[in-house]
Image: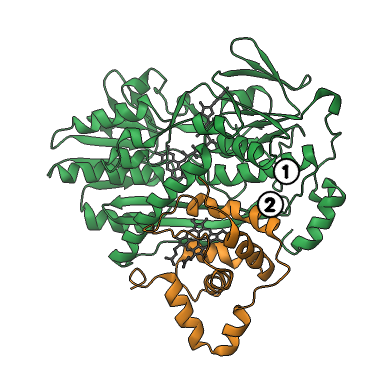
Amino acid sequence: MRRAMPARRSATRLLAMAGGMALGLLASPARTADVEYGKHLSAECITCHGASKSDSTIPDIHGLGEAHFVEVLRAYRAKALPNPVMQSIAVRLGDEEISALAAYYTTAKRPK
Amino acid sequence: MTNITRRHFGIMAGASLSALGLPILSAPSLAQGKPRVVVIGGGPGGATAARYIAKESNGAIDVTLIEPLKTFTTCFFSNLYVGGFRDYKSLTHNYDKVRKGGVKVVHSMAASIDRDKKQVVLAGGGRVPYDRLLVAPGIDIKFDSVPGYSEKAAEVMPHAWKPGAQTQLLVKKLNALKDGDQIVMIAPPNPYRCPPGPYERVSMFAHVLKKKGFKKSRIVILDPKPAFSKQGVFTEGWEKHYPGMIEWQDPKIHGGIKGVDAKTGEVKTDFTNYKPALVNVIPAQMAGKIARDAGLANQSGFCPIDAASMKSTVDPNIFVVGDASIAGEMPKSAFSANSQAKVAAMVIRAELTKSRAFPARYSNTCWSLIAPDDNIKVGASYEPVDGAIKASNSFVSQRNESADLRKQNYKESVDWYQGITTDIFG
Ligand SMILES: Cc1cc2nc3c(=O)[nH]c(=O)nc-3n(C[C@H](O)[C@H](O)[C@H](O)COP(=O)(O)OP(=O)(O)OC[C@H]3O[C@@H](n4cnc5c(N)ncnc54)[C@H](O)[C@@H]3O)c2cc1C
C-alpha cells in the first residue's frame, strides 16, 4: 500500500483531511530560515538521499518546493507517514531545523 | 545538549568552543601557512572526514589522507557478494574523486604517530606534520581470541571480516560445497564491526545452498553471545526461507568454544567435535594497530572519545572515528563511521578556521538481507547525553511484516549503498 502511494501525495491528502487551517500554517515556512544551518543539517540526509535518481526508493529531495518539504517532514515527525527511517530522522528536527533544511534544499544543487 | 536551541548554541560557539566542552587550543600560527589536517585511513570514517574538511573549508585547510590501498572494497554489502546479488567490482572504489575534491592522497601505511612533534611517520620513513590528526584505521582481528586460530589459519578458515582476499576466499569455498557438506561459523563477542553482519552472512550462505537445490547441508552458528542483533526477525526469516537448515547455538547449548585446528579442519566445543567443509571464524576485534600503538586506546582495545566532538580523550589534537572509536550506543558500522566523521570534520574546521559549529547529531541504519527481497532494518538517532553517545528514536523491523515492506527495505538499502559510497568517495 505504501509503495503504491508516494509520500508526497499521501502527505498532502492527509493534511487536507486535517483541515485548511493546518494547511495554511504549513504553507508558510519561517521567513528567517538559516540556509547555512540547513546546509550543515543536510550532511545527515546526504548519506541516504545523496545519489537519488527519479526512480529511486529513497527519493531525490532537491527542489521539492519549500512548503511541500516542510509539510512532508512534519508528517514524518508526527508519524503520520509510516517509514520508521524517516520518522527517526524527523522526530528530532524542530520547526527551525525543518525550515532551515527546506530553505537549503529548495535552492541547493544535487551533488555531482 | 538536547535542550540547548541551535540559536543559543550558535552564539556560544561564536564566543568560544569551550561551550562545546572542548579544550581551547591555540590556533596554528599563520606563519606556518594553512592549518594542516592529516587523516589516517581511507575507509568510510577517514575518507568522509577528509572530503568534508577539504570541501567545507574551501581550500583554507590543507588536508592529507594516508591510506595504503589504491582501491577500497567495502565490507558493507560484501554479504550480498557472498549471496550472489552483487559482483566484487561493484563494491570497489578508488580515490580519484577524493583527490579531485582537494585532498592530497598518500598511498602509504602510517607507521607511527609522534604525538609530541605532531607528526605522522610513514612506513617509508617520511614525516607528515599536522595541526589536527584524524585517526580512522578500522579494526584489527584478535586472532588469539579463538584458540588455534591465527593469521595463517585464516588462509584455510577465512574470517572475511576485512575486505579483499579474505572475502574472495570465503566465496570460493562456499561455491565449492557439495550437498551434505556442513558450514560452521564462529560468531564474534561484542563489541565488533556490524552487529547484524554474521547473521546476514549466514542467511546468504543458506540462500546459496538453497539455490543449488541442496537438501542435506546444514549451517551451525557457534555464538559466544546469549543473543544477537535483530534476532527475532532473523530467526523468523530462517524458519520461513530455510527451514531446518540453520542451527544457532548460544553458550548454554555449545557449552563453550574450545578452538579450531586449521590442519585437521576441526572445530571443538565443550560438547561436540565438528569437521565441516567450510569454517568461517569471526574472532574478537580491537582498534587498528596504529591507534593502539599511539596510546589512543584503553584496556578495551578501542579508543575513548568525547561524545560531542569525536575528539580523543587522550590527546586534544587527535580525533578518532569509525570502528576504532568507543562511540557509546552507536554500533560499529559504515553508516556510523560516516556520521561521526562529519561531526569531527565540523569541529576540526571550527577549531582551525573559526567557522560555525553546531551541536553534534549522529544517525545509523543497518539493513540486512535474509533472502531475495526480504530485507530487515534497525536504526536510531544518536546524540551526546551526559558525556556519552545515547540512542533515541530507535526502530527495528517486526515479525510478520508484509512482503512489500521487506522488498521496499531492500530497495532502500541499495539506494543507501549508492548514496553513502558517493558521500565517502565522491
Ligand atoms: C560482512 C560485513 C558486512 C557489513 N555490512 C554493513 C552494512 O550493511 N552497513 C554498514 O553501515 N556497515 C556494515 N559493515 C561495517 C563496515 O564495513 C565498517 O563499520 C566500516 O568499514 C568502518 O569504517 P572505518 O572507516 O572505521 O574502517 P575501515 O573501513 O576498516 O577503514 C579503515 C582504513 O584504514 C586503513 N588503515 C589501517 N591502518 C592504517 C595505517 N596504519 N595507515 C594508513 N591507513 C591505515 C585501512 O587500509 C582501511 O582502508 C559490515 C562489515 C562486515 C564485515
Residue B17 visible within the image: yes
Q: Give the number of callouts.
A: 2
**Residue drawn 38% across and 50% down?**
B414
Q: Give the orange chain's letter.
A: A
Front-most of residues B359 and A66 = A66
- Residues at marks 2 and 1 touching, judged by CB atoms closer than 8 Å: yes
Question: Mark 2 falls within which chain?
Answer: B
Front-most of residues B93 and B102 = B102
Secondary structure of residue under mark 2: loop
Front-most of residues B317 and A94 = A94
Q: Which residue is mark 2?
A: B360
The reply, left or right, for residue B20 in relation to residue B407 is: right
Which quarter of the figure has residue B151?
top left
Residue flagged by tag 1: what amino acid is it? Answer: Val
Q: Give the green chain's letter.
A: B
The reply, left or right, for residue B27 in relation to residue B384 is: right
Query: Residue A103's x, y, as percent?
Result: 63, 64
Q: Going by the picture, which residue comes out furthest to the top?
A: B125
Q: Which residue is mark 1?
A: B347
Tell me: residue B341, above or below residue A104.
above
**Residue B26, numbered label:** none
Tell me: residue B262, above or below residue B363.
above
Residue B227 visible within the image: no
Query: Residue A63's x, y, as percent?
Result: 53, 62
Q: Residues within 10 Å of mark 2 (few under 14, many from 20)?
A: many
Which quarter of the figure has residue A70?
bottom right
- Mark 2–mark 1 distance (CA, rounded to whole Å): 9 Å
**Residue drawn 52% across and 39% down?**
B424
Residue flagged by tag 2: what amino acid is it? Answer: Ala
Query: Residue B420's x, y, as percent?
Result: 48, 45
Q: How is the image coloured?
A: by chain
